[in-house]
Image: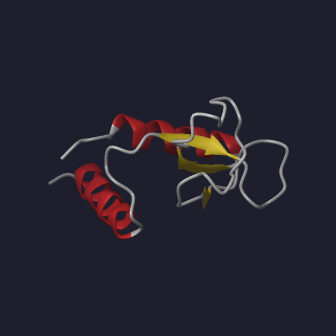
Amino acid sequence: MSTLSTTRTAARDLLATLGTASATEWRTCFSSNGSEEPTGIAPVCPDEDHEEDDGSVYDCCAEPVIECGSYPMAAYLAALLNADRGAA
């Protein structure tokens, strides 16, 4: 198994322990660090009243919210997780 496959499996297993399904769609979000850019990632909010372009995290939003430190890293991780959605 390649390092990438091993890492993907480990991340999928960790997210499962946090209650996040492998088919979860991810987005960038504003976490608690107060930055002007969305530097965290979180599952896409299932509430139909939560606008897709709103990067805020509300009570209706699913956990986990993961701080990534910068917008480019958050966007990259969300894209990687989305690319792996549903992969076994």
**In the image, what residue occupies the spot 23% across and 42% down?**
87
Give the total number of marks visible in the rendering.
Answer: 0
Front-most of 12 and 62? 62
Task: Say above or below: 53 vs 67.
Answer: above
Q: How is the image coloured?
A: secondary structure
Q: Where is residue 88 in the image (x, y as percent from the top left)?
A: 18, 47
Q: Residue furthest left?
A: 1
Front-most of 6 and 21? 21
User: Where is the N terminus found, in terms of image quarters?
Assistant: bottom left
Task: Say above or below: 15 vs 54.
Answer: below
Front-most of 48 and 45? 48
Q: Position of residue 75 (x, y in %)?
A: 59, 38
**In the image, what residue occupies the spot 66% across and 57% down?**
59
**In the image, what residue occupies the spot 58% across and 49% down?**
41
- The quadrant in which residue 54 appears is top right
**In the image, what residue occupies the spot 69% across and 52% down?**
58
- Give left or right: position of 39 versus 1: right
Q: Position of residue 28 (x, y in %)?
A: 62, 42
- Give left or right: position of 1 versus 75: left
- Give left or right: position of 46 versus 4: right
Q: Position of residue 47 (x, y in %)?
A: 56, 41
